[in-house]
Amino acid sequence: MEKNAAAGNGITGAIARSLLNAGVDAITLGDHVWDQRGWESEITQIERVCRPANLPRSNPGWDHLIIEARGFRLGLFTVLGRTYMNLKADCPFLTADRMIDQLRAQCDAILVEVHGEATSEKQALGWYLDGRVTAVLGTHTHVPTADARVLPKGTAFICDVGMTGPYESVLGRDVAAVVGRFVDGLPRKFEVATEDNRLSAVLIEIGASTANAQKIELLTVGR
């Protein structure tokens, strides 16, 4: 998930290609998908990049990916939450149903990213999909949560994986500018912070025969 790789606002074709060339297997996108001018044309030219599946079907780009390695096929897609989010999006629950029906016969496991603001909406989707997909991973709020677990029917879940970026910040932005805005309300430019860079991720162990998750562990790596 690389929603803000372009200096904190969306992604460009050049950045997407550099990430894929560096070894990234797939790039999913969230509510900042169309922030960069021209990306709506570039997205269709780059494989292994997909936009949220519950955006209007007229939006360009793939709504899912299938990644294969060592004979194992992983299907993945993103749904946007609709609580406190601004993009026009279809119901994430019904979209997930549609995508699972589409991918089930093509994949050995399915990973769902839920890109949303409300923890309640993300938790509800995790329970809704428990036993039907291998993992439901929340993103968007930039802050890793402490609720990683395997749900009763075998689906790994976490409300938010956290961001990869500068943790000496407020959600990746310069601390002084954000604090100042909260204190006096005056407009400021929120520059991207630069210190204490970390990679946030989860490690998921999958059963060989069932594709159920056996274990999920939050991982944060600093410099």
Image (tube, helix red, strand yellow):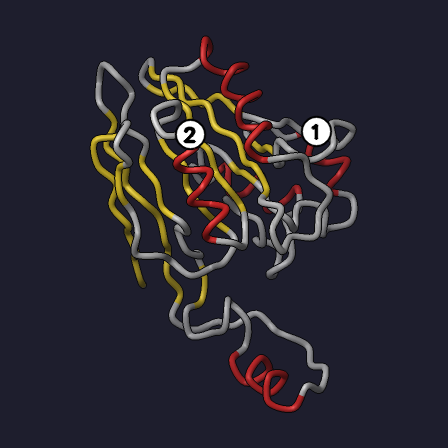
Secondary structure, mark 2, is: helix
Residue 185: x %, y % from top left: 68, 86
Which of the numbered marks, if any, corresponds to residue 44? Answer: 1
- Using the numbered discs, state the Cα–Cα distance from disc 2 to disc 1 in whole angstroms: 29 Å
Estimate how packed mark 2 is, as few (under 14), some (14 to 19) or many (20 or more) residues with alpha carbons within 10 Å.
Answer: many
Which of the numbered marks, if any, corresponds to residue 129? Answer: 2
What residue do we see at 62% from left, 31% from top?
53
Dot placed on the residue nearer the N-terminal end, 2 or 1: 1
**Left or right: 96 in relation to 147:** right
Q: In the rendered structure, which amino acid carries the disc numbered 1?
A: Thr
* Count of picture labels: 2
* Relative depth, front residue between 38 and 170: 170
Residue 194: x %, y % from top left: 48, 71
Depicted 199 relative to depicted 154: above or below: below
What residue do we see at 63% from left, 30% from top?
46
Quarter of the rendering occupied by the C terminus: bottom left
What residue do we see at 78% from left, 49% from top?
37
* Relative depth, front residue between 199 and 144: 144
What residue do we see at 39% from left, 50% from top?
161
Secondary structure, mark 1, is: helix
Q: In the rendered structure, which amino acid carries the disc numbered 2?
A: Leu
Residue 94: x %, y % from top left: 58, 28
